[in-house]
Each structure stands twice: as C-alpha cells, then as structure tokens.
Amino acid sequence: MSFGRFLAAAPPGGRETGATDVSKLMTMKDAIARFVRDGDLVVMEGFTHLIPFAAGHEIIRQRKRDLTLARLTPDLIYDQLIAAGCARRLIFSWAGNPGVGPLHAFRRAVEQGRPRPLEIEEYTHFGMVLRFMAGASNLPFLPTRNYPGTDLTRVNPGFKKVRSPYGDEELWCVPALNPDVTIVHAQRADADGNTQVWGLYGVQKEAAFASRRVIVSVEEVVDPSVIRSDPNRTLLPGAIVTAVVHEPFGAHPSFVQGAYDRDNDFYVGWDTISRDEAGFGRYLDEWVYGLPGRAAYIGKMGARFEELKADRQMCAPVNYGF
C-alpha cells in the first residue's frame, strides 16, 4: 500500500471530517460540542507532556456522559472526568498520579461505584500500543509474545490465541482499538490540521490514525509555509484531522516542550484535593465549571503561569536543499 493510499484508508465505520466548513479552525467549545458525543470511545493521549487537559475540562463542562475512555496511562485528567461522572468504562494499561500515588476518583468509582460504577479493561503498555497500531493499520488484531505467564489473559476476555500460519506456534493477540474521537495537544499546526510535535512522543499518531474523528489543540496556529519548512516534525497530516483548536497552555499541568514546564506542585497537591468527593467537587466548581474556557484558566493562574514558561534553547538548523 502506498503512503497516499494509507492516508486515505479509513478506520472501520469511516472517518469523519469537518469538510462542510471552509476551515477546520474552531473554538474548543465548538469542537467538543460537535465531535465528542455521549457514549463515544474517547482517547486523549500524550506521554508525560502534551496531555490535553483543556479538552478534558471542556468535556466536563459540557457534561458529556457514558464515555469509554482509553489511554495507556490514565492520570489526572481521566481522574477528573471520572469524578465528574463522564465515564462508564476505562481501557488502559496503568493508572495513577505519576510520582505521587493512586488516582482517588478512579478507585472510588471501581471500588465503591461513586459517582457511578466504572468498568475496566486492562492491558499491558505494549498491548495498548498494539491495539492502536492494529486500528491505525485497519487490521482486526495484532499478535504478540507479550503475555505468556500473565494473569491478564484470565481476567480479560479480549485476549485471544491464534496459531501462526508460518509454523505451529500459538500467539496471544489483542483486538484493534478504533476510537470515535482522539484528542491530541501539540506545539503547532496550520489551519488544515498538519500538526507538528517535538520532544517526547507517545502513541498520538497511532491513536489518531485509528480514529474516526481527530481534534487537535495547539499552542500556536502557523502558516502552512512554517510546516513545509520543517516537514519531518509533522506527526499528523491534515487529511486525518477533523478540527483544529488554538489553545495556548492547553496541556497544563503537564508540560509542552519549548512552551512551559510541568507543574509538579499541582501533581503533588492533587493527592490532597482528590482524596474526598467534597474536595474534588470544590476543584471542579472553581477551576472547570466556574470558568468559561482556557483563557480564563490562565488568568486565574496568575503569576504561576509566567513561572512555568520555558526558556529558549534553539536546535541547530538543518539544510533541506538539493
């Protein structure tokens, strides 16, 4: 299959676009209202940085319900979505407050059914990667040698065994994961959705290619000439992007390489905030429901916003000439 045909290949169920609009540019409020629907399977990826918190807050603000949330490492934003009653199911490989401890709303939902029961479906990290890769490749499953000896295959019926067509070996396999919508935060994109990332990568690309709809929020919207000037940084082509949202500081309290640092104090403080439902409720009322959007969030951050801004460490230029 040529690269062009791969871009055109749609996940099962078809790929939706914002083709009725002249531009894919829209506000976060409009993007979430149009493209995240009750009952959807939603992926919000990012590996320690570029976690789309602003999008998650808008989902909570719009009171989306019965979502299946998928992510390799659910952390604070999924804890908030669970506490707000948005989620009915979680597909994941690890969950916690990185470097601090457990996710308290997640535990309450699983152990006590509060604010509502939460179904869980657990894989290893590599198992989740394979699920996204299968979905992105328009395959029904992918095999792996990852699971002999693990108890996961006993508690998760999603694992199946297949016999290799090239020998007698039996392999475990995992099913493709095709989200209804994947949300990605990035450093920059143009209005067509050609999206560039630098720094740490996760599985944003695989999740986006596997998805029917893709919302990209970015620190900066740039002219297409900027994208073309450094094409190797383009993680997502505009052909698969449904909506583009200009949302500076959209990943706080996680970080964005070259824009702002990780807010470690927030992660530590979250353990206290989230331990009881009353504290969680006060946070949501003040920082999510009580604010119209991310610009107001930045204003409320005050001096902390300036403290987290990144310094400038420019990379060496490269020569793309012939």
Image (tube, rainbow, N blue to C red):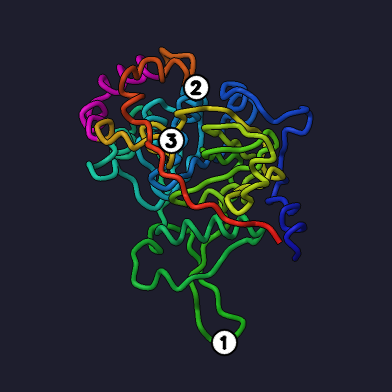
Q: Which residues are magenta?
A: 268-287
| Crowding near the residue tagged with mark 1, few <14, some 14–19, many ≥20 C-alpha atoms within 10 Å | few
Counting from the top left corner in percent of width and height, residue 99 is at 24, 45
- Give residue 156's mark: none
Whole-Å distance between the Cαs marked 3 and 2?
30 Å
Residue on which the image places disc 2: 63
Q: Amino acid at mark 3?
A: Ala
Query: Can residue 228 be seen in this snapshot?
Result: yes
Task: Give the side of residue 285 with respect to residue 143, left or right.
Answer: left
Task: Spot the residue most to the bottom.
Answer: 167
Q: Which label's residue is closer to the chain start, 2 or 1? A: 2
**Residue 286 is one of the magenta-drawn residues:** yes
Whole-Å distance between the Cαs marked 2 and 1?
51 Å
Whole-Å distance between the Cαs marked 1 and 3?
51 Å
- Give residue 167's mark: 1
Residue on which the image places disc 3: 259
Secondary structure of the residue carrying numbered label 1: loop
- Pair 1/3: label in front: 3
Counting from the top left corner in percent of width and height, residue 317 is at 54, 52
Q: Which label's residue is closer to the chain start, 1 or 3? A: 1
Q: Amino acid at mark 1?
A: Gly
- Which is nearer the eye, 276 or 27? 27
Task: Spot the residue most to the left.
Answer: 272
Chief secondary structure of the magenta span? Answer: helix
- Which is nearer the eye, 49 or 132? 49
> Which image quarter holds the N terminus?
bottom right
> Which image quarter holds the C terminus?
bottom right
| Crowding near the residue tagged with mark 2, few <14, some 14–19, many ≥20 C-alpha atoms within 10 Å | some
Q: Amino acid at mark 2?
A: Arg
